[in-house]
Amino acid sequence: MIKVRNLWHIYEGKKEALRGVNLTFGNEIIALVGPNGSGKTTLAKHLNGLLKPTKGEVIVDGMDTRKHSVAELARIVGYVFQNPEHMFFEENVFKEVAFGPRNLGLSEREVEERVEWALRQVNLEGYEDRSPYSLSGGEKQRLAIACILAMKPKYIILDEPTTGLDEKNTERVKEVIRKLYKEGHGILLITHEMELVLELAERVVLLYRGKKAFDGDVEEFFGLDLREYDLDRPRLLTISKEAGLGFVRSVEEFLNALGMRT
Amino acid sequence: MMYTLYLERNSLLHRLDPRVKIIGSFFGVVVLILFNSPVLLASLFLLIVLTLVILGKITLKEVFKVLKPLIPISVIAMIIWPFILKPWYFGLFIGFGYGIRLLSVALLTLGLIMTTPQRDLILGFIKMGMPYEIGLTLTIALRYIPTLYMLTQTIMDAQKSRGLELERGNFIQKAKNTIPVLIPLIIASIKTAHELSIALESRAFGASKRRTFLHNIKMEMKDYIVLGISLASFLFAVYMRYFLGIGYIKLF
């Protein structure tokens, strides 16, 4: 369990980025949403100790983040950054994925096993000898996930994993996220894409001006007046509502509800 | 994090044409090098401080803040002299002068930056004959310091999240630890530079040889007066040093 209690964060004595946030989560897919500057990234950076609380506390599986280094917490909480290129530095994909497990001090055999496993999870088997920078945008994103996955963290934070990806690659990333969730990982998904929230999340946490404005079930979330928070409801939901079909999570569900599928 | 030394004030020094300030500072540096008499150098130092405080509305606290990092170096310059010059108290006296000179040169150039917006400073250099391309390069370089600083922080965070410990190990290990940060940083910088050059060219950079400026500077009466005073003081200092032989102590 990750427990966030009355978390405040103030940047350089000025900007109050977080103002008393409480959050508890375990093995679930949570979407962390909110307009730009609402404190999403600040909150996420507290979960693996990159930022330390100004006030309040963050407890990760019983470990107080103030008393443990990021390297220690990285075994439990994985953080996939928004831009994959900000982490690639090795000459090939294999070494890139191996960097994390090697930092954990694992044996070379175990490192190899983990790299293979992680690449398989994101469907990048056979890419071991390619340069990370030669991959396509979607492949880079999946490689970034593999790099974190290879450290086998219990919780994974994904910062806008589908931004800039085309339909096909978005679909692949979604598949990876679903698979990881089924295998018992807790997923925290930071995103602006409400379609992604609708399809993947069980629970939604909405941050607004540094405070938690909503925390609950995804259906309830889309019942809110989202324009108040500078967010938009997915078209699919609007259409479905107009058609009197209620809450659906994907086009498929919508069509089923319409009775057009046999 | 402080990215620029410029301090926004409404003062005579701030309103002065950047060219006058650049020439004045240059004269000042030359004068500081002409003399080695500690008494004279200390007086010049006080003069610079007073000019900044009275004419530039810079507080003493701000003056001290920019000089603070240089104090150790000037102290070293000071304590080396007694080992070279005998008797030791004479050496210390001369060393004091050299220490003060170092601080004075630094304060003079920092004062220029503190009272002149970056844009005006570069425009001043261009008007004085520096090629426009170099001016633009300088502007871009300065503009990207905060951006690159932020990028470095992000990359460090990303690698720390993969278990990188920057502080671990001995000197060589620590140097090796920076590789995972440096490589993405260099690649991102090259990419940014490339994109920037495309953006510049797509806006027809270099299409005309002669450029006009959106924001222009013009010499006014006060600028000519200050320029005249600086030139006169400079000539007087040269006269003092070479014709009257004041302010220079022959050491060896």
Image (spheres, coloured by chain):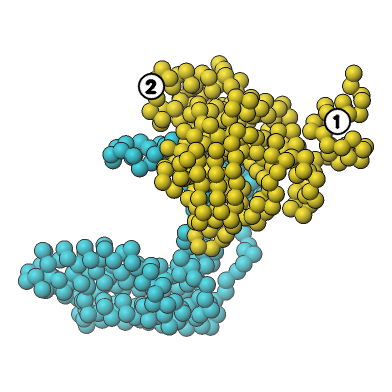
Q: Determine the secondary structure under disc 1.
A: helix
Q: Is residue A202 left or right of residue B188?
A: right
Front residue of this view, candidates B156 and B93: B156
Q: Give the chain of mark 1.
A: A
* Three-letter amino acid code of the residue under disc 1: Phe
The part of the image, by quadrant, that contains residue A233 is top right
Instruction: Name the colour assigned to chain A in the rendering.
Output: yellow
Chain B shade in the render: cyan
Residue identifier under label 1: A254
The image shows residue A175, relative to residue B199, as above or below, that is above
Tell me the kind of residue under disc 2: Ser
Measured as percent of width and height from the top left, residue B164 is found at 42, 37
Q: Which residue is mark 2?
A: A107
Q: Quadrant of residue B175?
A: top left
Viewer-side residue, B33 vs B142: B142
Q: Looking at the image, which is closer to me, A183 or B171?
A: A183
Residue B161 can be seen, yes or no: no
The picture places residue B2, in percent across and down from the top left corner, at 47, 61
Q: Could you tell me residue B111's position as x and y percent?
A: 41, 71
Q: How far apart are the alpha carbons under marks 1 and 2?
A: 50 Å
Q: Position of residue A98 (x, y in %)?
A: 45, 25
